[in-house]
Image (spheres, grey):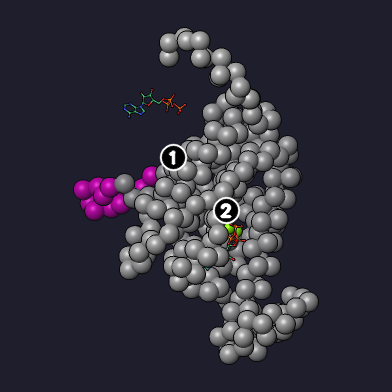
Amino acid sequence: MANSKYEYVKSFEVEDKLMPSTWIVVRIDGRHFHQFSDEHEFEKPNDKQALELMNSCAEALLEEFKDVVFAYGVSDEYSFLFKKTSEFYQRRASKIVSILVSFFSSLYVMKWKTFFPLKELKTIPCFDARAICYPSTKIVRDYFSWRQVDCHINNQYNTCFWMLIKSGKTKREAQDILKGTQTPEKNEILFQLGINYNELPAMFRKGSCVFRDKVEEIVKYNQDGDPVKRLRTKVGTVHRDIIGDTFWREHPEILSD
Ligand code: ATP
Ligand code: ATP
Ligand code: MG
Ligand code: MG
């Protein structure tokens, strides 16, 4: 752009670089999704299609932005982890946050029809986003543990709540029954309603992890008709425990420097 006497206005833009050599987490969360999920008649407590739409958006985001090494999603939120050494947009917070959240929102709208062929998108889905820097892998692990514990607590409460509603209780009655209950009592309530919590889909109980993994793929068949396989890196989604060490030990590349 040509120099002009107006160019000084640029100096009002303040620097917002994220701390160097730290893990960056960008967490997005659906705005008013309580309402949005009602308007679009999401199944309660967990609409499978809605969760899979979120996962599909997260997968496409990892395909596009190679610096994002891992993502964890539950309900209307997703957390995206950038490696410590990332120089994505020179680590400028507003650039990173705005690009990720707008990319995700656009995907959500684009993919809506695929996941809800019979439902019209009636209102505009939108997401807030923030970036947080974490200085150590331990804290990154604790961050994702925090989100997965939250997933568990919310899901257990919501499953109880909606089962009580389906059994004929009013919202008020269901709330009163659940007030102050701990995990064993909630499990007991579910058991009496004929539900074994541990048999619910892992996606509901554990949330969703998205990352690149090496998978064997058939690339072609040779003349004898035998498959020719190659190891390919592919973005995929799993529903695993990420609080314990097992998952991270199996995928050391995610948190390696
Ligand atoms: P805010 O704008 O503050 O985020 P919110 O209404 O989005 O408000 P959240 O705390 O983010 O509130 O909760 C999201 C809500 O969206 C859940 O409580 C639930 O009602 C609904 N929701 C999101 N995803 C699903 C889903 N897959 N199935 C059913 N309900 C869902
Ligand atoms: P960054 O990703 O850093 O924003 P950028 O390539 O988007 O980089 P901008 O400074 O935002 O750069 O400039 C936007 C550029 O997009 C313009 O220089 C121009 O080339 C192009 N552009 C935007 N709108 C139009 C338009 N309506 N017609 C033609 N070109 C356009
Ligand atoms: Mg929300
Ligand atoms: Mg939320």
Q: Residue at x 38, y 61 (%)?
A: 121
Residue at the spot of label 2: 29
Residue 140 shown left or right of residue 3 in the figure: right
Viewer-proximal residue, 133 or 83? 133
The secondary structure type at the circle numbered 1 is helix
- N-term mark: 2 or 1: 2
**Cβ of disc 1 within 8 Å of ligand 2?**
no
Q: Is residue 230 magenta?
A: yes
Residue at the spot of label 1: 64
Q: Quadrant of residue 9?
A: top right
In the image, the segment drawn in magenta is 220-231
Viewer-proximal residue, 30 or 6? 6
Q: Residue at x 46, y 63 (%)?
A: 50
Residue 167: x and y in percent read 58, 89
Query: Type of residue at label 1?
Result: Glu
**Cβ of disc 2 within 8 Å of ligand 3?**
yes
Viewer-proximal residue, 103 or 185? 103
Q: Residue furthest left?
A: 223
